[in-house]
Image: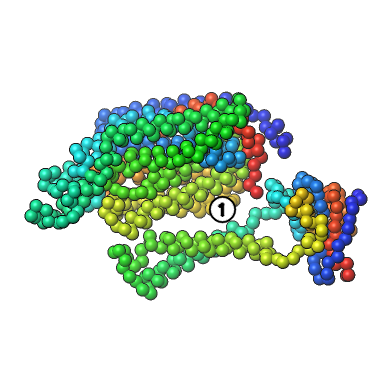
Amino acid sequence: MSVETTTVSVPEGRPALLLAEYETPGACMKAAEKLRDAGFTKFDTHTPFPIHGMDAAMGMGDSKLGWIVLVMGITGLMTGIALITYANGIDYPIIVGGKPAISIPAYVPVCFELTILLSAFGAVFGMFGLNQLPRHHHPVFESDRFKAATDDKFFVSVEYADPKFDADRTPELIASTHPNHIEIIEDTES
Amino acid sequence: MSAASTTDKTDYRTTGTGWANAWKIAAGVGALGLAGAGAGFAADAQRFSFSYLFAFFVFLTISIGATFFVLLQHLTNAGWSVTVRRTAEFFMSALPIFALLFLPIAANLDHLLPWWNADHGAHHAPAAAGEHGDAHAPVVPETPHGDTAHPAPEHGGHGQHVAGHRMSDDQIEHSLHAEVMASKAWYLSKGFFAVRAVIYFLFWTFLALKLFRNSTLQDSTRDLKLTASSQAMAPAATFGLALTTTFAVFDWMMSLLPNWYSTIFGVQLFSTTMVAILSVLVLVSYAMRASGVSGSAITTEHFHDLGKLLFGFNVFWAYISFSQFFLIWYASIPEETVFFHLRWSNGPWKTISLAILFLHFVVPFALLLSRNTKRYAGQKVLAFAAGLLLTMHVVEMYWEVLPNYAAQRGIGPHTAESLAPHWMDLACLLGVGGVYLAAVFYRMSQHPVVPVGDPRFARSKRFQNA
C-alpha cells in the first residue's frame, strides 16, 4: 500500500489526528464502515453535503437528544402548572369573566408555551452539548487540503485518542481503503 | 443501489391477492348497510337523517383528506411520498361518489336543518333549545313564543321595552336569536345552499378524477408532462379545496345549529380530514406490506414520515379544537356557547368529549412522540395509534353531528336520553362506508398499488430519512 502521506505538526498538547482524503462519497462511506467494524469509536467523517446512510456506516446509535428534549418539555409543563396555580390560585386570585380562580382551560396556553420554550432550549443547547460545541479550534484545520471538505473532497479523521488506535497499524488500515492522500496531524515534539 | 430495484420483481398489482376481491366484500357490506338504513328511514326519517349524515361525514372527510394529501405532495414536489401517494389517490378517486351518497341527505334536509323550512329564517331559532334546554326546561323547536307576540328582528336586542311591556328573559333571548338568524338569512337560503352544493361536488369530482387520471395514465406512458400538469394545478386547487371544504362543513354540519358562530370550524374539520387520511394511509400501507403486494416499495422510511405527519397533524387538530373551545369558553357569548352546552354540560356527551380529549389526543400523542415507535418493531405501535385515531375519528364525527339530534327534539344535554345510540348509526356507517370502500378497492384492483410510472418512483424506494 503506497499512499502519499504527509505529516503536519501541531503545537504540543493538542490532540492528534489521522486525516484521509477520498474522491467519492462511496469510498468515504466504505472507510467509515471499515473503521466501525474494526471497533473504532473516536472518528468522524467530513463531507461537503449530508450522505444518507453515513450514520449507520459510522455505527452511530440513535441520538440521545430526544430524551433531553422530553425532560425539558416535562419540566416546562410542570413549571407552567406551578406558575398558574400560584399566581392565579394562591397569590392573587381574581375572578375574571365568572371563571373560577383555578380553571384548567386557562392553564393550557401557558403550559403549552412553556413546554415548547423549554423543549426548544433543550433541543438547541442539548445539541450543542452533545456535539461539544462551541469549539473554537479542531486539529483538522491544521491541514490545508481539508479546505476541500466544503468543496469536492470527502474526509475521514481518526483520533489518536481512540483506544483502538495504533501508530503503525491504523495508517495501514486507512491506506487499504484507497484514499487520495493521508495526513498525520500530530505533535511531532513528543 | 440500483440492485435493489432489479431484485424487486413484483408488478405491484393486486391480482391473485385478497385485495383484488376486497371491493366485492365492501359492496356486499354496503348493500346490506343501505338496506338496513332504508328500513330505518321508513321507521324514523329524522333519526335516519342524523345517522346517515354522521356516516357520510366519516367517509367524506377521509376522501377529502386524501385529496389534500395528494395535492400537498404535488405542491411540494415531494419525492419521498411517491410510493405511498397512490394509496391516497385510491381514497381520493372515489370522492365523486359522495355526490350520489349526498342524495339521501338532500332529500331529508327538512329533518336536519332547523332553518330549512323556517318561513323567514329569522323567526325560528329552534336550535337555541340546547341553550337553556336542560331536563327541567326543555325548549322544543316549536317554541311557545307566538310569532306575532315577539318583536321584529330589527328591534330585537335593543330596548327591553317593546309595545309598552317589559320583555321576559326568554323573549329577549329569542329576539336576539331572531336577529342573528335574520343576519344569516341571505346565506342560509334554499337556492343558494343548492347552488353551493352543486359547486362543491363539481369541483371535487373534477379535482379527484383529473389528479387520479394524471397519475394512473403515467403508469403506462411515463409522460413527465403529467407530473407537471398535477403540479401546475396544485396551488389553485389547494385554495379551491380549502374553500369548498370549509363552506361544505358550514352548510352541512355547522348549520345543524344555525344560530351558532365559529369561524375556525372549517379549519377544525380540515385538520380532522388530515388525521383521518394519514391514519388510513398508515393502516393500508401496513396491510399492503404484510401481504407483500407493495413489494419493497414501502419501507420503514415511509412509515416514519407518515408517522411524523400523523403526529404533527394530530397535534394541529388538538390545537385547533382547543382554540375553538378556548375562545368560546372565555367569551361566554350565548350564540357561541350553545355548541359546547350540548357537549360539555354534565351529561353523557361530556363523557364522549373527555374520551375524545384523551383517546384522540393524549394517548396518541404519547404513542407517536418517540422516533422508535415509528421505525422499530415493525411499526406495530404506529399501526395501533393509527387504528385508535381512526376509531376516534368516527367518534368525533358522531360527536359533531348527533348532539344536534337531541337538541332539535328538545332533549336537554343533562339528560341520559341526549345520547342514544341507534342501530341505524351502524347501518348507515356500513352502508356509506361499504359503497365508498367498494369504489376505492375497485380502483385498487385496476391499477398498480404504487405509481410505477412516476419519474421519482425509484428515488422514493431508496428514500432515507437522514
Q: Quadrant of residue A19?
A: bottom right
Outermost residue, right direction?
A: A2
The residue that disc 1 covers is: B370
Residue B4, horizontal then vertical, whole percent: 70, 36
Q: Residue A110 placed where, x, y %? A: 44, 63
Residue B312 falls left or right of residue B336: right
Residue at the (52%, 41%) spot, across then down: B72
Instruction: State left or right for residue B273 relative to residue B452.
Output: left
Left or right of A144 in this view: A77 = left
Q: Amino acid at mark 1?
A: Ser
Instruction: Write down the chain letter for disc 1.
Output: B
Q: Residue furthest left?
A: B164
**B105 versus B147 height, above or below:** above
Pinpoint residue B15: horizontal percent, then vertical percent.
57, 25
Residue B221 in sight from this viewpoint: yes
Looking at the image, can residue B424 be seen? no
The quadrant the N terminus of chain B occupies is top right
